[in-house]
Amino acid sequence: MSTAVYIRVSTVGQNEAGQKAEIERWLKGHGITDATFYVDKKSGDNLNRPSFEQLQKAVFAGEVKTIVCYKLDRLSRSLKDGINTLVSWIEAGVRVVSVTQQLDFSGATGQLVASVLFAVAQMEQETRRERQKAGIEAAKARGQYLGRKPGTTKSKPQRAQKLREKGLNAEEIATAMGISRATVFRYLKAA
């Protein structure tokens, strides 16, 4: 049985280095030298994330004793999904720790605190979406929001082709360019 680390950023363009550094400092401080890292670059709105799914399999195969995360909302931004995941892990005998919140969620008190933190994470997500929607509606009313122009790109499609020629795979190209894998495939098809 081992220690697993779960890191999540919301988009491919974001960097997980800050989370990783804090977690590595915590691991070192607790004498843990061998941990398996699971990193996702996807929204926390649902649990359909490749590394999260791998972590789930490892937990229920009995391979994980402790899960360390940067902050509880990295696991989920949904109250229901977060609580269900946390409870199932704890019932499987797994200790869950948030390094920045300095909390261990394994006991009853930890689970109570976790439910509040997951509720706050969900509320923040909903509030952000409401503000975004209101801003778009106001901009549309002023005639200033036209949406994204057809054919615009986040970066140059030719760069994807050059990276492919250098031997990078789609995931590596997506990370290098700060775009999704689907966009990489679209760029490569167009080039």
Image (spheres, rainbow, N blue to C red):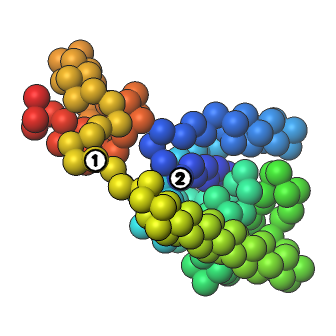
Q: Is residue 34 above or below residue 146?
A: above
Q: Residue at x 36, y 55 (%)?
A: 147
Question: Mark 2 — residue?
Answer: 10
Q: Circle 1: is it few (<14), some (14-19), or many (20+) Cα within 10 Å?
A: few
Helix, strand or loop under label 2: loop
Residue 64 percent location from the top left of the image: 61, 60
Residue 131 position in % (x across, y down)? 61, 67
What residue is drawn where x is 89% and y is 79%?
109
Question: Residue 47 in the image: x percent, y percent?
Answer: 48, 69
The residue labelled by disc 1 is 149
- Mark 2 to mark 1 CA distance (whole Å): 24 Å
Q: Secondary structure at mark 1?
A: loop
Q: Residues within 10 Å of mark 2 (few under 14, many from 20)?
A: some
Residue pictured at 19% horizontal, 36% vertical: 187
The answer to whether marks 2 and 1 mark residues whose Cβ atoms lie closer than 8 Å is no
Q: Seen in the image, is 28 located left or right of residue 142?
A: right
Going from N to C along the chain, the mark reached first, 2 or 1, is 2
